[in-house]
Amino acid sequence: MIKKLLSTPDDLSLAVLRLILGGVFFIHGAQKALGWFGGHGLNNTLDAFTQGMGLPLLVAVLVVAAEFLGAIGLIVGFLTRLAAAGIFAVMVGAIGIVHLKHGFFMNWFGNQAGEGIEYHLLAIAISLALVLSGGGMASVDRFLSRK
């Protein structure tokens, strides 16, 4: 079971997807968890998710963990499939709870009430590719699965 979870081909394209998705979500996760990059930090984020959006506290904590710890996992390629599955779930939830009502397009020009789903669909597609295939070359998973 563990070997299957860690197995991945020596594929550069998967590594590129893993590193880009991990880098993007590290920034978003660090905003939520640490208050970096202009973010609000953990307590304010959890308050916004639980009081503002009505999410259960456990779900709010899992969202922050998926974005922050999952991103670190993606960057180093450790438990890539699990990390990508967490981001997949967060993005599906974000579409259903927040973004679908705003349509497809991001709010590039500030003329919508919120952000659409195009970014989230890209993150879903990339995370699904990583769930299915693993993290590719230069990943901890690849190193461990070869032992």
Image (cartoon, rainbow, N blue to C red):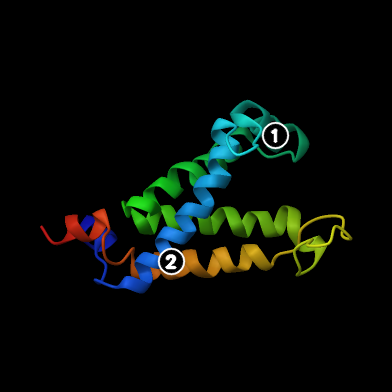
Left or right side of 9 for 57: right
In the picture, the quarter occupied by the N terminus is bottom left
Q: Residue at x 25, y 72 (%)?
A: 9
Q: Residue at x 18, y 60 (%)?
A: 145
Tell me, yes or no, whether the two marked residues, 2 and 1, touch with CB atoms within 8 Å.
no
Residue 143 figure quarter: bottom left
Q: What is the crowding at mark 2: few (fewer than 14 residues within 10 Å), some, or many (at least 20)?
A: many
In the rendered structure, the answer to whether residue 54 lies left or right of residue 138 reads right
Decide if residue 100 is on the left or right side of residue 146. right
Q: Does 12 appear above or below 30?
A: below
Which residue is at a point 33% across and 63% down the rendered structure image?
A: 135
Q: Between residue 125 and residue 56, name the one nearer to us.
A: 125
State the residue position of label 1: 50
* Circle 2: residue type: Leu
Q: Label 2 belongs to which residue?
A: 17
What distance separates the C-alpha of mark 2 from that of mark 1? 31 Å
Left or right of residue 7, residue 42 in this image = right
Residue closer to the observer: 46 or 27: 27
- Residue 93, given in percent of the width and then of the height, sits at 64, 55
